[in-house]
Image (cartoon, rainbow, N blue to C red):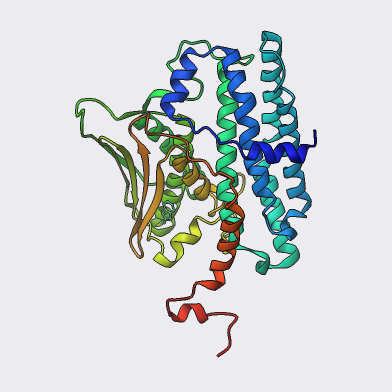
Amino acid sequence: QDIAKLIQRYSRYQQSCLSIEQFTSFGKTAKPVESFQFGRHELPVRLAHIIREIDLLPKNLLKMPSVELVRGWYVQSFSELIEFQDEEETDEVTNRFTQSLKYIKQRHDNVVETMAQGIMELRQREGDDAFHPSIEYFLDRFYMNRISIRMLITQHLLLFGQDARSSKSNFVGCFDPNCHVVSVVEDAINNAAYLCEQNYMASPSVEISQVNAYDPKKPVQVAYVPGHLYHMLFELLKNAMRAVVEQHGSSIDIPPLKILITKGKQDLTIKISDQGGGIAKSEIDQVFEYHYTSAPEPLTTGAAAPMAGYGYGLPLSRLYARYFDGDLQLYSMEGFGTDAVIWLKALSEEASEVLPLYNTRTPKNYEEVRLSAQHCRDWSSSKFYGHGHKF
Ligand code: W6P
């Protein structure tokens, strides 16, 4: 059957959003063949949804070689998975499926870099005018879809693959049902501080406190993916430490970072406060853009790993937070400092995947994002007349 037709068909199936509770209970009891039955349908559905959406990108971007390459990977993986639809549910087929997932995961390892490359090529060729706001909208959806697909594949491989973990730890695949938040925070602090020392010969100290509102004697724990939590914390801490050291580097007493971790009935919240001079309100949104144009050259002194200007770190971290229905925001007081806040769902049944879905109205949304950039000027303000208009 024609692959384009199949992609259309699968993009009309509904995606199944799983909660952390579902991931962990499934992971504890499911047999390989059940994971095969779920994955052989759900994975092509999620791939189809995003392939349809890639096809809505502006034509000039779609024609960039890197973007064509990425699209080709998605179609290839879709076709490989479709092959399993009518297969018998035997151990042999299940093993072949597992092997396939391993290769598919590898094929997509460099999607983020390659997509970024395509967008840079477009900018080099056509200038910043080629930069549709629809690209930011797309990338959030595209990378969220990728996070979700890699989660499904990773879970299957960790639970049923060649090097499936011996069940000594309490982990269920990449989930820790009792993730000790302070430990992950300390881990991220150590690595961010090390990087900061390498780059600036100094790093701020960090004061951690926690409040477990409903179980005051216990440390704050949550069912989560420690890898995702670490990723967000490391990114925020690098930014906070860099800001503080650049602001106070020469002085003897650098103001410490303060981290507050709280757990209520619904929310687990982590706040990182720095006194790094802050960012103006007008620049906060840009910090979450994938191609923050005025980003400085990667900050590095010699051989050390870069401390990073704002690259993809912050927008991707926010996606990790939102993936299980949490969020990540910055509150800044310019001239003083910044609070970065991560919200996670405290209850594993409420921590449910948030996925972009393709439906008949999706093309219209892209059109509207495109238009809203010029269209909805129904508040007067001098900043709208900044460039491009002569009066
Ligand atoms: C800053 C800029 C920033 C980004 C993310 C997290 C913390 C901070 N602090 O000054």
In the current view of this chain or complex, which residue is farthest to the bottom?
Answer: 391
Tell me which corner region of the image, top left, top right, bottom left or bottom right, holds residue 391: bottom right
Could you tell me if residue 133 is visible in this image? yes
Quadrant of the drawing holding the N terminus: top right
Where residue 217 appears, as percent x and y from the top left, is 20, 25
Q: Which residue lies at the image location 66% right of the left edge and 12% below the top edge?
A: 89
Residue 12 picture location, percent across and down = 62, 40
Q: In this view, does 298 lie to the left or right of 124?
A: left
Which residue: 33% across, 33% down? 346
Residue at 44% in and 60% down: 284
Residue 29 in picture, x, y percent from top left: 48, 12
Q: On the rendered structure, is 201 left or right of 50?
A: left
- Ligand 1's quadrant: bottom left
**Left or right of residue 357: residue 183:** left
- Given residues 100 and 342, the one toward you in this image is 100
Q: Identify the residue at image location x=41%, y=62%.
A: 279
Name above or below for residue 9 compared with residue 156: below
Label total for image: 0
Q: Which of 158 and 133 is in front in this view?
A: 133
Vertical comparison of 366 with 256: above or below: below
Residue 291 seen by the camera: no
